[in-house]
């Protein structure tokens, strides 16, 4: 592979990683904003579900 192709591939991986981090932060902020609208048990359950979905970004190759 040429150097430019490798650089482009690395930039793509970094961009995907940053997008996943932004999505995780956004989902946590949404969870914090919705605490007032739900009971505690509902919030705990949905927070657990969202953690399971958002932490899957570590499977990036």
Image (tube, helix red, strand yellow):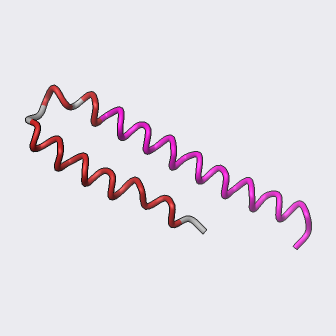
Q: Split into 4 quadrants, where in the image is the C terminus?
A: bottom right
Is the stretch drawn in magenta largely helix, strand or loop? Answer: helix
Task: State the image quarter where residue 12 is shown.
Answer: bottom right
Q: Residue at x 18, y 45 (%)?
A: 44
Q: Is residue 9 above or below residue 18?
A: below
Q: Is residue 61 magenta?
A: no
Q: Position of residue 34 (x, y in %)?
A: 22, 31
Check the image and name the residue furthest to the bottom.
1
Q: Position of residue 30 (x, y in %)?
A: 31, 34
- Left/right placement of residue 27 relative to residue 40 reads right
The range drawn in magenta is 1-30
Q: Is residue 2 magenta?
A: yes
- Left/right placement of residue 5 relative to residue 13 reads right
Q: Position of residue 3 (x, y in %)?
A: 91, 63
Q: Is residue 5 above or below residue 45?
A: below
Q: Residue at x 49, y 58 (%)?
A: 57
- Left/right placement of residue 10 relative to residue 38 reads right
Q: Residue at x 11, y 37 (%)?
A: 40
């Amino acid at each position: 592979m040429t150097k430019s192709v490798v650089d482009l591939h690395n930039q793509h991986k970094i961009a995907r990683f940053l997008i996943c981090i932004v999505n995780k932060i956004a989902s946590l902020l949404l969870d914090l904003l919705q605490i007032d609208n739900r009971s505690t048990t509902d919030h705990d359950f949905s927070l657990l579900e969202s953690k399971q979905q958002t932490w899957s970004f570590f499977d990036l190759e």
